[in-house]
Amino acid sequence: MTVLEERKIGKTGVTLTSLGLGTSPLGGCGVSVSFEEFENVVMAAYNLGVRYFDTAPLYGLGKSEHSLGHVLRTNGIINDVTFSTKAGRILKPMSRAKRAESLYGINWVDPLPYVDEYDYSYDGIMRSFDDSQQRMGVDGIDILYLHDVSGVWHRDNYDTYLTQLRKSGYRACDELRSSGAVKAIGLGVNETASVLQVASEFDLDCSLVAGRYTLLNHQPLIDFFPEAQRRGIAIIAGGVYNSGVLAEGSKGDAAVRTYDYQTAGPEILARVEALEAVCQEFGVSLSTAATQFVYAHPVVTAVVQGALSTNHVEANVAAISQVVPAGFWAALKDRNLIPEKAPVPASVDNFVY
């Protein structure tokens, strides 16, 4: 078993391994996934040292929560791991409700017979929390993320859902945390602006942010990370491959060679090729560089990656744990592929804003 580094989320007492397993792919995101496959991937991750698992009502419309809870309980490891789920969506019977609009039009294969409806009110968050507990078969949840509280996601309806939070949703979060039913509260989003917006109104412990800080996107170094660190918000980083191109590389299959869920354009591919040249020179895989670059920042508590097979899990663990020559990071900076002030594994302890 690989011994993965652990970091704490502020004063919450919640500890995460450097690598977490995200279960969106296992919920049937575009592909069919059997329960046996789900269990094999989760247990492979556990046996390789992963102790953090993330799910959500959205993933498979309840299927991922059901499966994850069952795997953790029946294998006797529920008390050995940290797990998170999300609130902000209520699942309702498919035959009697209309599905919420989704930014990416996610195609869940063989989901449970429900549709999701947004609700960030007190009653909505409390119901979502209770429903998640029942689906997972647990009494209490380590981390509860408010899912897709985002102007990018909700667009014209963003103010409507923020108003729900302000009127009563924050109160639900506060009650859940103060009672001990939830140990940490955060957002689960694909942008940074909403994290700072909500943090100015409610005390967040952490946030799961996907695709915003990567080898190809350094903007959070300037505006987001310093403020998150000042406020004590631990960042759990998802989407470190920018949805595919930093895993597949510049010559990968065009269908999965994507940047922010869109086909990677010539400019992005040229930057990836430059990164690949340095990786080849130092014998470092692109996925390893992408993973360790993100985790090197002191505000990042863990990196969460999905997997559809045990091979994927093994590759993810290798990417976070392999030793990278110190000269590799210096070469990336010398060639202006990452900012000079970006923290890297060899110098993270000495990083100063």
Image (cartoon, helix red, strand yellow):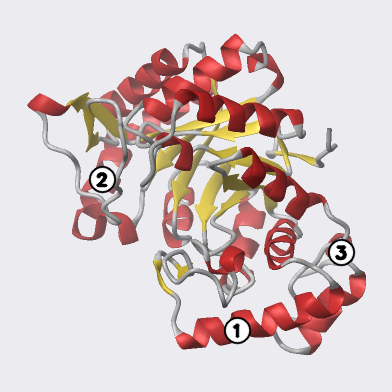
Check the image and name the residue furthest to the left: 96
Could you give the CA–CA distance between mark 3 and mark 2, rounded to whole angstroms?
A: 44 Å
Viewer-nearest of discs 3 and 2: 3
For the C terminus, the image quarter is: bottom right
Q: Residue at x 57, y 77 (%)?
A: 250
Viewer-nearest of discs 2 and 1: 1
Query: In the visual, does 105 lie left or right of 339?
Result: left
* Callout 2 amino acid: Tyr
Query: In the visual, does 338 lie left or right of 169?
Result: right
* Callout 1 amino acid: Arg
Q: Residue at x 31, y 21 (%)?
A: 127
Residue identifier under label 1 = 271
State the SS at label 3: loop
Sequence-first tag of 3 and 1: 1
Q: Quadrant of residue 331?
A: bottom right
Residue identifier under label 2 = 161
Could you give the CA–CA distance between mark 2 and mark 1, rounded to whole angstroms?
A: 37 Å
Crowding at dot 3, Cα within 10 Å, few <14 / some 14-19 / many 20+, comes out as some
Could you give the CA–CA distance between mark 3 and mark 1, rounded to whole angstroms?
A: 20 Å
Give the percent coordinates (x, y) of residue 339: 71, 80
Q: Nearer the viewer, residue 215 or 270?
A: 270
State the SS at label 1: helix
Q: Nearer the viewer, residue 233 or 90?
A: 90
Q: Quadrant of residue 293?
A: bottom right
Query: In the visual, does 4 lie left or right of 228?
Result: right
Q: Residue at x 60, y 61 (%)?
A: 227
Whether residues under marks 3 and 2 lie with C-beta atoms below 8 angstroms apart, the answer is no
Crowding at dot 2, Cα within 10 Å, few <14 / some 14-19 / many 20+, comes out as many
Q: Nearer the viewer, residue 190 or 21?
A: 21
Residue identifier under label 3 = 324
Q: Is residue 338 visible?
A: no
* Callout 3 amino acid: Val
